[in-house]
Image (cartoon, rainbow, N blue to C red):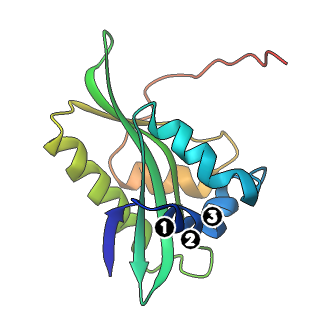
Amino acid sequence: MQIKFTETDEEIARCFPVMLQLRPHLIESEFVERIRVQERQNYRLAFVERENKVCAVAGLRVNDNLSWGRFMYIDDLVADETERSQGLGSQLFEWCRDYALRMGCSMLLLDSGVQRFDAHRFYLGKRMSISSHRFSMGLK
């Protein structure tokens, strides 16, 4: 098993089937370009590969702000549904946390939809806290 950041368009494209399980609105023909656009905004896509198969993916950003100082925000974290309950999501989460520490982050943040009870159980098990409410407003 190996965890690393994507570098090539092919590696990004190989992550699409797993990411689609978390973000079903995504369109395969647009995926690589959308990742490349986000990369220009500090986004990095990491993946777990086992036996030449992408098993889990995480999209993350390292940024700074007045509220938290230097922090990592995890945009996306998903293990392939056929690979769940094998510890891959946990290993990827720990890898992200370790990367945040190496990058000098003082906080690790993510949002999880209110309906995602299994994800909440996972994050609480990772000793994360529910620290705020997210308010949103659609603009289209």
x and y, in percent, of residue 20 in the image: 69, 60
Q: Which residue is mark 1?
A: 11
Q: Are marks 2 and 1 in contact (CB under 8 Å)?
A: yes
Residue at 57 percent of width and 41 percent of height: 112
Residue type, label 2 = Arg
63 w.r.t. 91: above or below: above
x and y, in percent, of residue 73 in the image: 40, 36
Q: Are marks 3 and 2 in contact (CB under 8 Å)?
A: yes
Q: Nearer the viewer, mark 1 or mark 3?
A: 1
Camera-nearest residue between 102 and 45: 45
Judged left or right of residue 68, residue 16 is right
Q: Earlier in the sequence, mark 1 or mark 3?
A: 1
Camera-nearest residue between 52 and 19: 52
Residue at 23 percent of width and 49 percent of height: 99
Mark 3 vs mark 2, CA separation in Å: 6 Å
Question: Is disc 1 surrounded by few (<14), some (14 to 19) or many (20+) residues within 10 Å?
Answer: some
Residue type, label 3 = Phe
x and y, in percent, of residue 68 in the image: 29, 19
Q: Which residue is mark 3?
A: 16
